[in-house]
Image (cartoon, rainbow, N blue to C red):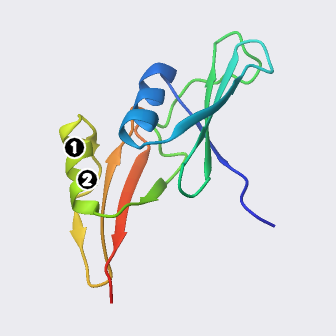
């Protein structure tokens, strides 16, 4: 068994798409609307080929429900980067809200920001031994 993809429900597709493509570096590999009022944008990480689906539902869609939890339905997504300090600073400078302070430990450096939906997005770099 292998993880195929992760899907997150988004409040604003335009803002979410800008965040994941421009700030996180994912590329759009597909778009579809299999059900009236549903929009799915498929994203892929160029390096790892991991997939993330952004899911948006109009009020008229049979899958719609009010967005109540502000992103806590999904704990966090973690991205491995070369330099977490630089990536975290760039995300914060670009307007991403802070979820945690940057943490610099023995084995890794990491910090988490919030995407436009309130979902925590982490950047982590491992230290060379």
| 128 to 82, vertically: above or below | below
Q: Return the residue nearer the eye: 104 or 60.
A: 104
- Residue 51: percent from the left, percent from the top? 63, 47
Badge number at residue 123: none
**Quadrant of the image for the C terminus?**
bottom left
- Residue 50: percent from the left, percent from the top? 61, 53
Contact between marks 1 and 2 (CB within 8 A): the answer is: yes
Few, some or many C-alpha atoms within 10 Å of disc 1 (few <14, some 14-19, many ≥20)?
A: some
Where residue 19 sits, quadrant-wise, is top left
Residue at x 25%, y 79% (from the top left corner):
105
- Name the residue that disc number 2 marks: 88
| 38 to 98, vertically: above or below | above
Residue at x 49%, y 37% (from the top left corner):
69
- Name the residue that disc number 1 marks: 92
**Image position of 124 (left or right of 32):** left
CA gap between label 1 and label 2 equals 6 Å
């Amino acid at each position: 068994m292998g993880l195929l993809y992760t899907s997150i429900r988004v409040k604003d597709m335009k803002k979410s798409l800008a965040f994941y493509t421009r700030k996180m570096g994912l590329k759009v590999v597909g778009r579809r609307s299999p059900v009236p009022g549903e929009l799915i944008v498929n994203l892929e990480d160029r390096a790892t080929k991991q997939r993330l689906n952004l899911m948006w539902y109009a009020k008229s869609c049979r899958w719609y429900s009010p967005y109540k939890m502000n992103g806590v339905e999904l704990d966090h997504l973690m991205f491995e980067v070369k330099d977490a300090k630089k990536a975290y600073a760039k995300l914060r400078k670009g307007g991403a809200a802070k979820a945690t302070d940057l943490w610099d430990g023995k084995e890794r450096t990491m910090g988490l920001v919030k995407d436009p939906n309130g979902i925590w997005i982490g950047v982590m770099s491992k230290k060379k031994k």
